[in-house]
Amino acid sequence: MAERGTNGFWAFLRVFGRGINVVRLVIINLIFFVFLGFFLLLMLGFWAGSHGERGVQNDSVLVLKPQGELVEQFSIEPLERALQGLSGNAPKQVQVRDLVSAIDAASSDSRITRILLQPQELHAGGFAALREVAAALDRFRAAGKPVIVWASSMDQGQYYLAAHADRVLLDPMGGVVLTGLANYRLFYKDLLDRLGVDVHLFRVGQFKSAAEPYVLDHASPESKEADAFWMGGLWDRYIDEVAKLRKIEPSALRAAIDGLPDAIAGTKGDLGQLAFNEHLVDGLATRDDLENMMRKEGVPAGGKGEGFRQVDLRRYLAGVSPGRVLEPGVAVVVAEGEIVGGKQPQGSIGGESTAQLIRAAREDRRTKALVLRVNSPGGEVYAAELIRREVALTKEAGIPVVVSMGNVAASGGYWISMNADRIFAEPNTITGSIGIFGMYFTVPGTLDKLGVKTDGVGTGPLAGAFNITRPLDPKVGTLIQAIIDKGYRDFVGGVAQARGKPYDAIDTIAQGRVWTGQQALDRGLVDQLGGLREAVADAAQRAKLGKNPSVRYVEAPLGTVEQFMVNLNDSSATVALRAYGVHLPEWVAQLPAMAPELKLLKNAQSGKPNVYAYCFCEPR
């Protein structure tokens, strides 16, 4: 009986083993055939690309239809971005530099006769980046080529670009909605009180309001005063620029915006007709009307599914030369996003990783000048200081450093900028906010609501002082405030030394107060108004590189697989496959985003107070 049971057991194991082997072979074969199929599709794409239209044809229209967020640097992971493209979906981010490069290249490209801009799917986070793109459109028009805008509808950010066109057309069912700027925030004090969470805020600066939502149930008068001043400056400039471009009196444009609810009644709810009546657009046209207009104006017929001959941004950029990146010239390091400690992925600022990029640029013999492109509301003070030190070391090495401020370079964003040889900002950049704060949470009240107590002993008065289950000792609060006070003095003192001004003069315009680029120029916090193009030219002049320097971006290298996927996504074969409707399933592109909560854990810190130079100062 025992022998029969033993034989039965071994027979079961043999069957089980054969089953595992079959499953293994099925999986291996499945993977093999998936890759084989993808390889065959890729070869089909190369064949389609070689037998179809190659390159950009003469008399083509460059169609710019940016989708998603306008950024200085991709923050979507490279693999995720590649998978999105391969699945037939455009990545929901577009880089400023890509738009500007394409427009500038097209201005001298005889094959491109005009630009068609369709901005309705662009989400702009700030006006400074829009101004960079708008300046490129102006240069394109100055080359004698028209810019045409057609949109289904436009908000005020999208319309800012549209105003720089020769002709603005709107779908008859669409509208242009300009509302003004606002900065409303949620306040959590009442909620935290109900939960029994104690928030201990330590700050310096009368206007340093970033952490107010945790200790107040409304915005402070100082916060409202400062916000009204810098947002008023941004909005005044918007009105003046758009009115000038559209040949409207600024007062009339402002009145039209403020009187929208009453004016819409006059057109019986027709926003498109109202936009035409108020000279915000030049005509109402459907997509078919647009295509017929292009054909009547001499643009040849396009390929399958295209009403006129055209080339999109991705395909056009694939044929634009990357420039003389191997020659000595200007290195550009992008610092975009919140400043946090450690190493962070591309599209965000890590104290160690961004400092490493600046150090790598400095140690590269090709780098004769450095431009730091800053688009950041700040973050952790120590991380910002690590980056600032690398800027200072780069200057000490005899390499000129120029800062170009984007949409926002405030608080910690200004901290990493202050030691540059020259600081450029757009008139509508948000900057300043020179001030710091610290926050610490304790939860004894929360535990008490749950019927939980904490007790024990320590070897000294500071032992266990940062245990969040215990109330904060007032003496420890005094210690933290002293550290915050020193941090503020270091910040103001560093700016005063860098700007060549007395401490008191900087302290007066610091206090955490936010300024526009124009207001900051008036107060000596920046040196010149201008964008990245002007900053690069200034850096090249300081390094005596001439008027047409080599420019390269210094970025963290991609892994082998990531680089392959990105290159594949941008290849002509993949573009051809997409044109034939062949692409990866859409769900594949979503794989990297299925566990977003993991991203929240990367920078989480608890059990100690953190010191921040941060500004929540981006209007919506």
Image (cartoon, grey):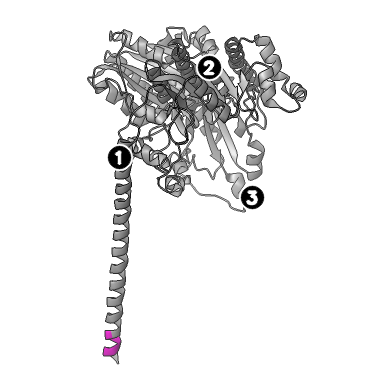
Find numbered disc 1 in the image and state the secondary structure of the residue it sits on: helix
Q: In this view, which residue lies farthest toward the left? A: 365
Q: Nearer the viewer, mark 3 or mark 1?
A: 1
Relative to 546, 142 lies left or right: right
Q: Please tell me how crowded label 3 is: few (under 14), some (14-19), or many (20+) other residues with Cα within 10 Å.
A: few
- The mark that comes first in sequence, 2 or 3, is 2
Q: Nearer the viewer, residue 219 or 609?
A: 219
For the residues marked 2 and 3, what is the alpha-carbon distance in whole angstroms?
61 Å
Q: Which mark is residue 46?
A: 1
Q: Are marks 2 and 1 in contact (CB under 8 Å)?
A: no
Residue 473 image point, x, y percent: 54, 36
Q: Quadrant of residue 85?
A: top left
Q: Nearer the viewer, mark 2 or mark 3?
A: 2
Q: Which mark is residue 464?
A: none
Quarter of the picture containing the N terminus is bottom left
Task: Find disc 2 in the rendering and name its residue.
Answer: 165
Task: Find disc 3 in the rendering and name its residue.
Answer: 449
Find numbered disc 3 in the image and state the secondary structure of the residue it sits on: helix
Residue at position x 45%, y 10% in the image: 142
- The mark that comes first in sequence, 2 or 1, is 1
Q: Quadrant of residue 190?
A: top right
Q: Nearer the viewer, residue 585 or 206?
A: 585
For the residues marked 2 and 1, what is the alpha-carbon distance in whole angstroms?
37 Å
For the residues marked 3 and 1, what is the alpha-carbon distance in whole angstroms?
67 Å
Write down the region rendered in magenta: 3-7
Tag 2: amino acid = Ala
Quarter of the picture containing the C terminus is top right
The reply to whether the magenta stretch includes residue 131 is no
Above or below, comparing residue 4 to residue 410 in the picture: below
Main SS of residues in magenta: helix
Tag 1: amino acid = Phe
The reply to whether the magenta stretch includes residue 6 is yes
